[in-house]
Amino acid sequence: MTTTDIRVSGRTVEIKRAEKELFPGDGITKADLADYYRRAGRRILPHLRGRPLMLERHPDGIGDGRFMQKDTPDYFPDWIHRAELPKEGGTVGYPVCDDLATLLYLVDQACITPHRWLSKADRPDHPDLLVLDLDPSGEDFESVRRAAARLHELLDELDLPAALMTTGSRGLHVLVPLDHRAPFDDVRTFARDLADLLADRHPDELTTAARKQARRGRLYLDTQRNAYGQTAVTPYAVRALPGAPIATPLSWSELDDPDLTPQRWTIATIGERLEGDDPWAGELRRGRSLKAVARRLEKL
């Protein structure tokens, strides 16, 4: 088995079993995954720094089981940052990815997808992001596209900036930057009120019903990630699906692109986009307070 040494962030990271195929149907190896995350480092790291992570690990590749890991094992190097955060009955020492060496070490551990908290470790109860997951009942992406456009219109009514991204799976995420002041309970209530209003405006197409039987083919406006300890896929993260699709930030104008799909960009096709302009440049810089926005939402 081959070990590849990569020098980054002032450290040497070993990628053991570098030739191991993590995506057997596509021939994508652990070395290929490390190469992608190294190239994407300047784009993905700003979305990871300071945040507790849940690691989606596939030691034997995507076709042979996975496990989701929240705690940081004792064998992880001391230089990997931890966040000791409370849970019911104790605490969890979450890994935090603050540099490229950490990201590549996680690849060595067969972490294909890092899922991040919506808050940072220094203020875990106060998120700086709100996420709405547009989750179709099947493979109908046109319903996702329409829902995103309608949500964008509603957010414009509320004068609330937001960013858009593919999930690399079936749908889209809409992210709203917050100012860290509102606790999770208030953020989740606002997100649910926002989704309820949108569903009320388009009851034949949209729903906030969590039970699949109650959705009746309608697109689900999922707000449940807006809670303490919940996670969402990180922008520019690889998904553990055939073809290695990538959760990719979009500009809102790209919503009208007829070629857009939730899995449009993959490890094999993302290169040119990484080298181009960041579609989120400026989108998430200024977090908003929910107080005034919540009052405007009540009036609607």
Image (tube, rainbow, N blue to C red):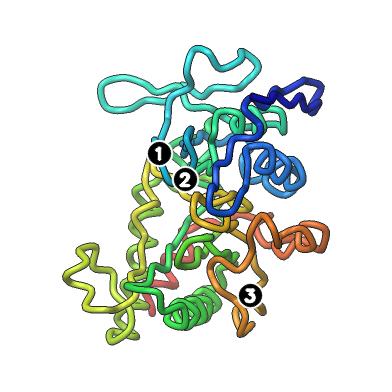
The answer to which of marks 2 and 3 sits earlier in the sequence is 2
- Distance between the Cα atoms at labels 2 and 3? 31 Å
Residue 101 is situated, as x and y percent measured from the top left of the image, at 71, 28
Location of mark 1 (residue): 66
Asked if disc 2 and disc 1 are in contact, CB closer than 8 Å, the reply is yes
Residue 279 is situated, as x and y percent measured from the top left of the image, at 72, 65
Residue 61 is situated, as x and y percent measured from the top left of the image, at 49, 40
What label sits on residue 252 in the rendered view?
Answer: 3
Location of mark 2 (residue): 62
- Distance between the Cα atoms at labels 2 and 1? 7 Å
Q: Where, by quadrant of the figure, is residue 90 drawn?
A: top left
State the residue at coordinates (61%, 15%): 77
Q: Residues within 10 Å of mark 2 (few under 14, many from 20)?
A: many
Q: Secondary structure at mark 3?
A: helix
Which amino acid, by three-letter code, is at mark 3? Trp
State the residue at coordinates (69%, 43%): 32
Q: Is residue 147 above or below residue 83?
A: below
Which of the pair 151/108 is nearer the observer?
108
Q: Is residue 193 above or below residue 93?
A: below
State the residue at coordinates (33%, 58%): 189
Q: Residues within 10 Å of mark 3 (few under 14, many from 20)?
A: some
Q: Where, by quadrant of the figure, is residue 26 drawn?
A: bottom right
Which amino acid, by three-letter code, is at mark 2? Ile
- Distance between the Cα atoms at labels 3 and 1? 33 Å
Q: Secondary structure at mark 1?
A: loop
Q: Secondary structure at mark 2?
A: loop
